[in-house]
Image (tube, helix red, strand yellow):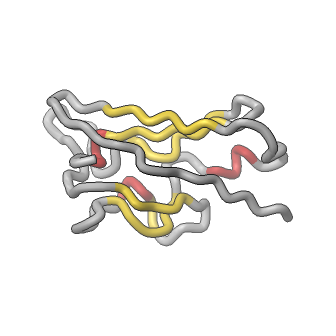
Amino acid sequence: HGRPGDIVLILTSPNNTSVVIMDRPGTTGSFLDFGCANDDINATFDDEGSSTVEGVCNASPGISGTLIPHNLLNAFDGESSQGIWSLEVQDKATITNTGTLNSWSLETIIQ
């Protein structure tokens, strides 16, 4: 996507627990603030990441690395990883701009 700052990602577990893992990175909330404008997202979301996703806007890809999600993934602690997980992608752009979800995956760690 040409403007990762337009994107909201919501992960939902088989138990219907939903976590916003990315919410328009780089935006400050002002009317004309469109957030990170550097192409593409290639990131791993982990509660123990190196920095918060909202604070990252690299050269290319714009959002990359192992990042702390907008809301922590520990909301899923204690839930079974079995079943259907979904990733909702919202494009909050106010102008014509498109993107493609090429792939996503979920890795669980049993402790």
| Residue 2: percent from left, percent from top | 22, 48
Q: Is residue 39 above or below residue 65?
A: above
Q: Residue at x 24, y 37 (%)?
A: 98
Left or right of 97, for residue 5: right
Quarter of the image where the C terminus is located: bottom right
Q: Residue at x 76, y 62 (%)?
A: 109
61 and 74: which is toward the camera:
61
Q: Is residue 109 above or below residue 8?
A: below
| Residue 61: percent from left, percent from top | 29, 63
Left or right of 52, for residue 35: left
Q: How many marks?
A: 0
104 and 77: which is toward the camera:
104
| Residue 17: percent from left, percent from top | 69, 33
Q: Residue at x 73, y 58 (%)?
A: 108
| Residue 51: percent from left, percent from top | 45, 67
Left or right of 41, for residue 104: right
Q: Residue at x 78, y 38 (%)?
A: 83
Left or right of 73, for residue 5: left
Q: Residue furthest front?
A: 102
Q: Is residue 66 above or below residue 54?
A: below
Q: Quadrant of residue 28?
A: top left
85 and 45: which is toward the camera:
85
